[in-house]
Amino acid sequence: MRHRIKNSRPFGIRNIFRKKRTKRTGRRLLLESLEDRRLLAVTQLTPEADALVYQYSAATNYGNFGTLYATGGGIESYLRFNLAGIGGDVTNATLVLQPYYNYAGSGLLYAADDNWDEMTITWNNQPDHGSQALASFTSTPNVPLQIDVTSAVQAETSDGLVSFYIRGAGAGDYSIFYSDENGVEQYRPQLVVETGGGSTNQPPVAVNDFRSVNEDTDLTISVLANDSDPDGDALSLLSFTQAANGTVTQVGSQLKYRGALDFYGSDSFTYTITDGKGGIDTATVLMTVNSVNDAPTISNIADQATAEGVAKGPITFTVSDVETGAGSLFVTATSSNASLLPNSGIILGGSGASRTITMTPTANQVGQSTVTVGVRDANYTTTYETFVLTVTASNGSTTVELFPEVDALVYRYDPSGNYGTYPYLYAYGGNIESYLRFNLGGISGDVTSARLVLQPYSSYAGSGLLFAANDNWDEMAITWNNQPAHASQALTSWTVTPYAPLEIDVTSAVQTETSDGLASFYLADAGPGNYAIFYSDENGVAQYRPRLVIETGGGSTNRPPLAVGDIRSVNEDTDITVNVLANDSDPDGDVLNLLSFTQAVNGTVTQVGSQLKYRGEQNFYGSDSFTYTITDGHGGTNTATVFMTVYAVNDAPTISDIANQVTNEDTVKGPITFTVGDVETAAGSLVVTATSSNTALLSNAGIALSGSGANRTITMTPTANQYGSTTVTVSVRDGNYVTTSDTFVLTVNSV
């Protein structure tokens, strides 16, 4: 048997002229007024049993179902309450049912026999019910339904049980209510019974709230703050509706509103409060959502390439905006290299959301230009998209990029060990040396240029020598003991710069080796104390692997690209994506790509496509920087620096949560501890204040704040001979006058 009695403590009606000290008699509180003596008890009961029965599954029991149905035929419901805890004469009884979402309609309520069990009742064995309905009802979506059942409860107090049967009023009527099995207590059915000879419980007063918030922003509202109860009962949220143009969620005793994406204008929702003794009231929250201009959007335009003097396009892209119609958006385009692509050579077309761009380069010109396409809305907010147009000329030369067919290190102190699968190559103090071999079988034509490109591992740097080596070695068998012979004369010397790719000219060696189709190199340090580490071909990142870049044909050698430093600023704790290639160029018109980048000292850098995203460490502000290296795909590389200025943004102060508090009449509550903090302002300089929503019960003068630094306390002294509840708001303000608040409820019990 599931029998729950809540808030069964009787309460009295306070006379407005004077209060007489009370005395406790059992579980009832006796109050004497100037006019008469009255005793009133309000008891809230939840069902000891409830269930629906279903005509089309007539032998099935639905006793543990989470909802009750009242339809015009086919699904009906029963509830039974145990009145054993009720004492005194019943003066009023109300059945309260909470509609399930928007399911609402009309129906009838009957008294029913008590001889049924929640876990065995079915359509076939449902109990008898009266032929005359006790009441008719019409439910409203999301608003608790209250039905007067006083006469039925008065008639049933002798046997201690009362059962009800609900059904739809007719065909097409369809109501659904939460059952006692629902996990949210406030939604369960209730029978509110009043006994005694006095007046009934006075319901609470819910007062409308008016709030404003910017578009696409949350707002948390303390809806109970301006509500009250004439009996001084503690109030709580019973239910709430959803707004037409937004979402409402409960956060503790508050409600959080967020408008639909990009919505602005007027909106509203309702909420219902309860005093815990059967009294409820409903109010409306009226929202004004302020419009915030949204920046227009433009789709990504990929980098483009064309031949000298050949038009490129039309290339399609799309534009849009929340406030401005697509047809009214203003689109512009400019070129960074007017000699190669004048602005007059850019033609924009299309209409509405679908636009096009066509570019005609200057005749007999090659190279690159960064094209910037802007879209501006009616509020003069502009969004930009950039891409690179590369114009190439055919000069008869060919560039080939080769990866090693084999590479390995050999180790003096493990002379028989093979390191062919190791992901690094060493030139280390005469004790660790490395070999690489490239297959030139795919090379045709005369070799005009050859570069060996090695990527240093981390910050390891040093000087060394490069030698030509014999080709008769195997990656999975080479050791210190059987390493191949190498030339006695070094091809060249080299010095590593940390993180920057090392490029070594090996043109003569490759030209010599094209006859047998293989070129091997031996990598050694320059002497004791020198060491360097490079990524090997076994590394999983292609751009870090060794490469042999060879040019053949009758053209000129590849010219390296030009990387130009970038200067950017961003607010603290905010991402910024930098198109680092936008201002870089290549004299041969080659398409540029990111080869590598370093991490910033005070932030994190990640690659997003062809761009780099920077985010400073949490709460960091000041100057920061990182470098990046670009490649033209033909062996040419260059490095530049991105300089970041991170602006400080004031962080709101913090305050720990203070739980709801309870004390007896004429009793001090506290000290209650809580903590405050702030990023920019020292805890000792934070200003803490507190206010009471019910100054008759708890005056602001009755609130004492103490403590120091991060540790603070609050002590509350209620007004003498007063009881009820008040919402206490504790606020902390930092040195920039930004305030954060925490609220809790102080309940003062009558004694």
Image (spheres, helix red, strand yellow):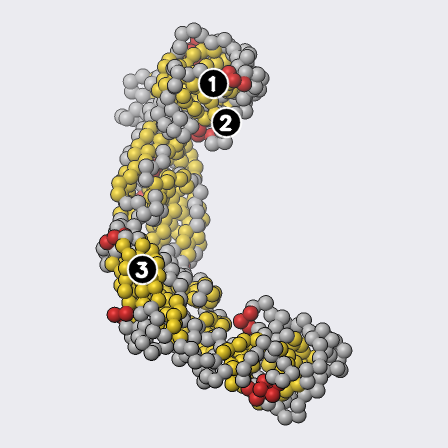
What's the residue type where badge 1 is placed? Ile
- Observer-nearest residue: 487 or 447? 447
* Mark number, residue 66: 2
Location of residue 609 (image quadrant) = bottom left
Q: Is residue 725 above or below residue 118?
A: below
Q: How packed is label 2: few (under 14 Cα within 10 Å), some, or many (20 or more)? A: some
What is the spatial separation of the Cα atoms under label 3 and label 2, in whole angstroms?
57 Å
What's the residue type where badge 3 is placed? Thr
Q: Is residue 680 visible?
A: no
Location of residue 559 (image quadrant) = bottom left
* Mark number, residue 356: 3
Residue 541 position in % (x across, y down):
56, 68
Q: Secondary structure at mark 1?
A: strand
Residue farthest along the top direction in this orientation: 131
Q: How packed is label 1: few (under 14 Cα within 10 Å), some, or many (20 or more)? A: many
Residue 91 position in % (x across, y down):
38, 14
Q: How packed is label 3: few (under 14 Cα within 10 Å), some, or many (20 or more)? A: some
In the image, what residue occupies the spot 40% across and 75% down?
392
- Observer-nearest residue: 693 or 245? 245
* Mark number, residue 75: 1
Image depth: mark 3 or mark 2 in front: 3
What is the spatial separation of the Cα atoms under label 1 and label 2, in whole angstroms?
14 Å
Q: Secondary structure at mark 2?
A: loop
Residue farthest along the bottom direction in this orientation: 489
Residue 34 position in % (x across, y down):
29, 20
Label 1 or label 3, whichever comes before in sequence order: 1
In the image, what residue occupies the spot 59% across and 90% down?
491
